[in-house]
Image: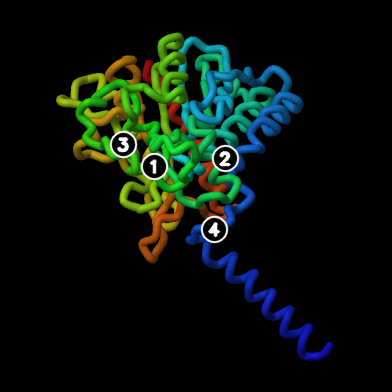
């Protein structure tokens, strides 16, 4: 063997080593474990083919600008309704990955696992992998790496401005909307021109009016790293028994969600919570449901937020959150 092929092999081995050793990086293009928008429907069809009858697949409505379907998957036959929304913000895709993992595991478990069958007899679990298919599409297609809002043409110039157009769907719910001062339509946190102006938010409100949810869980990820691996609860004036019960559930989940790059587990944020039109405030105050936001994605040893990790880490995160969720369902059933 002459020197060139040897060097190539050595270089290849080093590359391989490097990619295994440093899990704490954001990958772009995204790893294959990060779900792509165009793969969602084929994924749901494959679940229905492999596990007939395990899921009911519905369309809650359509996105406002591109009329993309808002899919929901209903699992279980119980009387206690639980809602999971994997994504409000375009580049926050770990929640979508967790939702798909849950759908797959629950479908398989419904056939082979007595513990899962018991959960599905007691609960009806509604999983909405994405409430922001427009933003997800843009990020999936590689048109933008960082994006938060939907694709509403907020400056009315007849075209999609990827960096500035759109409404922050998690500021558009009809609760505390007046108290949110973000009226600049160029801002990533633009609350919209009116409460529930966005069809995506309207679709969830319609669902919430029909189904009495006991608990709603929203997965998010924060690229700034300021919020990672924490659970946020609704804004309240006093910590009454209903709030304390919710906090106990959040603490229970947090204690079972292991951190990505450090020892220890998630924690529940204890300080004040945003008084804006977000989903957790809407479900807690208007729908009498428990509601929590879970910030998935870790901080690496350099202090960087990792929300688009390599495949191995995505799979690890999926498993951890699925386990924590199932444990919470079992815990809630023991308490009541
Ligand atoms: Zn978010």
User: Mark 1 Cα within 10 Å, few/some/many (few <14, many 20+)?
Assistant: many
Front tag of 2 and 4: 2
Q: Which mark is residue 137?
A: 2
Q: Find the distance from the CA under tag 3 to the CA under tag 2.
A: 27 Å
Asked if the residue at tag 1 contacts the one at tag 3, i.e. Cβ–Cβ closer than 8 Å, the answer is: yes
Q: Position of residue 137 (x, y in %)?
A: 57, 40
Q: Find the distance from the CA under tag 3 to the CA under tag 1.
A: 8 Å
> What residue is at 28 percent from the left and 39 percent from the top?
184
Residue linked to disc 3: 232
Classify residue 51 by image quadrant: top right
Q: Is mark 1 within 8 Å of ligand 1?
A: yes
Asked if the residue at tag 4 contacts the one at tag 2, i.e. Cβ–Cβ closer than 8 Å, the answer is: no
Q: Report the front residue among 326 and 288.
A: 288
> What residue is at 24 percent from the left and 35 percent from the top?
274
Which badge, 3 or 2, is on the more N-terminal residue?
Answer: 2
Which badge, 3 or 1, is on the more N-terminal residue?
Answer: 3
Residue linked to disc 4: 27
Q: Find the distance from the CA under tag 4 to the CA under tag 1.
A: 19 Å
Image-quarter location of ligand 1:
top left
Q: Is mark 1 on a helix, strand or loop?
A: strand
Which badge, 4 or 1, is on the more N-terminal residue?
Answer: 4
Q: Report the front residue among 226 and 301.
A: 226
Q: Report the front residue among 142 and 87.
A: 142
Residue linked to disc 1: 295
Front tag of 4 and 1: 4
Which badge, 2 or 4, is on the more N-terminal residue?
Answer: 4
């Amino acid at each position: 063997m002459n020197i060139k092929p040897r060097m190539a092999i050595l270089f290849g081995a080093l590359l391989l080593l490097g990619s295994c050793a440093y899990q704490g990086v954001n990958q772009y293009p995204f790893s294959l474990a990060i779900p792509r928008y165009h793969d969602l429907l084929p994924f749901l069809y494959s679940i229905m083919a492999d596990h007939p009858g395990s899921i009911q697949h519905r369309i809650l409505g359509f996105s406002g600008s591109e009329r993309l379907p808002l899919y929901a998957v209903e699992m279980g036959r119980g009387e206690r309704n639980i809602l999971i929304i994997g994504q409000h913000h375009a580049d926050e895709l770990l929640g979508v990955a967790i939702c798909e993992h849950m759908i797959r595991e629950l479908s398989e478990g419904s056939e082979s696992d007595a513990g899962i069958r018991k959960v599905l007899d007691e609960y009806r679990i509604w999983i909405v992998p994405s409430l922001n298919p427009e933003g997800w599409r843009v990020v999936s297609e590689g048109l933008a790496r960082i994006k938060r809002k939907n694709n509403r043409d907020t400056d009315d110039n007849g075209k999609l401005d990827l960096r500035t157009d759109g409404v922050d769907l998690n500021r558009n719910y009809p609760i505390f909307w007046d108290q949110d001062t973000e009226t600049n339509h160029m801002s990533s946190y633009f609350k919209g021109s009116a409460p529930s102006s966005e069809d995506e938010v309207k679709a969830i409100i319609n669902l919430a009016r029909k189904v009495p949810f006991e608990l709603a869980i929203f997965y998010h990820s924060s690229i700034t790293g300021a919020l990672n691996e924490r659970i946020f609860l609704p804004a309240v004036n006093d910590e009454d028994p209903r709030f304390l019960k919710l906090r106990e559930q959040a603490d229970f989940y947090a204690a079972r969600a292991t951190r990505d790059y450090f020892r220890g587990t998630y924690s529940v944020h204890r300080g004040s919570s945003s008084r804006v039109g977000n989903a957790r405030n809407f479900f807690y105050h208007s729908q009498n449901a428990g509601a929590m936001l879970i910030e998935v994605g870790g901080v690496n040893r350099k202090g960087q937020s990792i929300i688009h990790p390599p495949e191995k880490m995505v799979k690890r995160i999926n498993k951890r959150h699925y386990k924590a969720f199932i444990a919470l369902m079992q815990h809630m059933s023991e308490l009541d």
